[in-house]
Image (tube, rainbow, N blue to C red):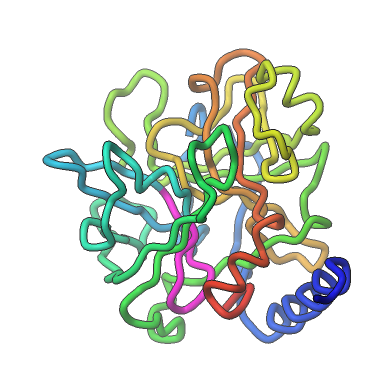
Amino acid sequence: MRPLAETEEEEEEECKSKRAKCECGKMPITVTGLRIINGEDASPGEFPYHVMVLTMTGNRMNTCGGSIIKKQWVLTAAHCFYGKDKIRASSVTVMGGSIFRDKIYELHSDRVFHHEDFRSPSQGDDVALIHLSEEIDFAQNPKLKPICLGRMRDIPYGGMVVATGWGKVIGKETMTNTLQEVALDVISTRECASLMESRLPNDTNKIMCAMTPNKDTCQGDSGGPLVAQMSDGRWAQVGITSYGLGCSLPDKPGVYVNVAHYLPWIMEKTGACTC
């Protein structure tokens, strides 16, 4: 067996090479004045990787977010597929192609892969992949584009990230029709553990935390992407919306899956880290 460090270095080089050859993360995201809880409407074409993930449990429709990371793969949260029983792929619908909920269209899926160690969001491993039944032709579907997957170095500790979702907003019981965006600040896992009263996985490398006063992700945003701008100007997904203590409560951060920690798992399932 090769040393772990060597394996990670090889995976890093493979990701770097593939990322350079694809069109991931190239999108006109604007970050000035962003206010999902106290977010604001996204602009057309701003988040072409964001999709809605619908699941049926009995007669109830549940909503999550997700992100296109490759022609035939969507990244989301594992807890979106767990109710009383594990939800089957036949009960999953992926929708994308617009920032408006009433204009998105179906991307047919045929398989769902949950992380094998997932038990609950607060224990970590809250990551899942949806396999689409047909590849997306990005040239023919310019409103759909993949997001790059972030490495550890892409996480801007102390800096800003952007979350998106169609989840509930303060003062409204229904979800918004227009995709919402919100800018959040990344905080250290040590600070997060203190604010969350240690309600974090034992291995805090599995998660990252972000917060900004009066701004947050909420119900319906789970599984959605948290992105940061890389040094080359493109955007990479560094987190997956996982859980929190309420929505936009004072001094309570949102907890997100650390995508970089799961790159080996993602590569094993999809055959590549991006595109």
Camera-side residue of 134 and 39: 134
| Image quarter in which the C terminus is found | bottom right
Camera-side residue of 30 and 117: 117
Up/down of 108 relative to 63, above or below: below
Quadrant in which residue 16 is drawn: bottom right
Quadrant in which residue 19 is drawn: bottom right
The stretch in magenta equals 65-75
**Which residue is most to the front?**
1
Q: Is residue 50 left or right of residue 60?
A: right
Q: Position of residue 106 (x, y in %)?
A: 26, 66
- Residue at the location (60% across, 56% down)? 29
Camera-side residue of 108 and 4: 4
Quadrant in which residue 25 is drawn: bottom right
Q: Does the magenta stretch mainly form a helix, a strand or a loop?
A: strand
Up/down of 203 relative to 130, above or below: above
| Image quarter in which the N terminus is found | bottom right
Q: Position of residue 171 (x, y in %)?
A: 36, 18
- Residue at the location (50% across, 58% down)? 47
- Residue at the location (51% across, 27% down)? 38
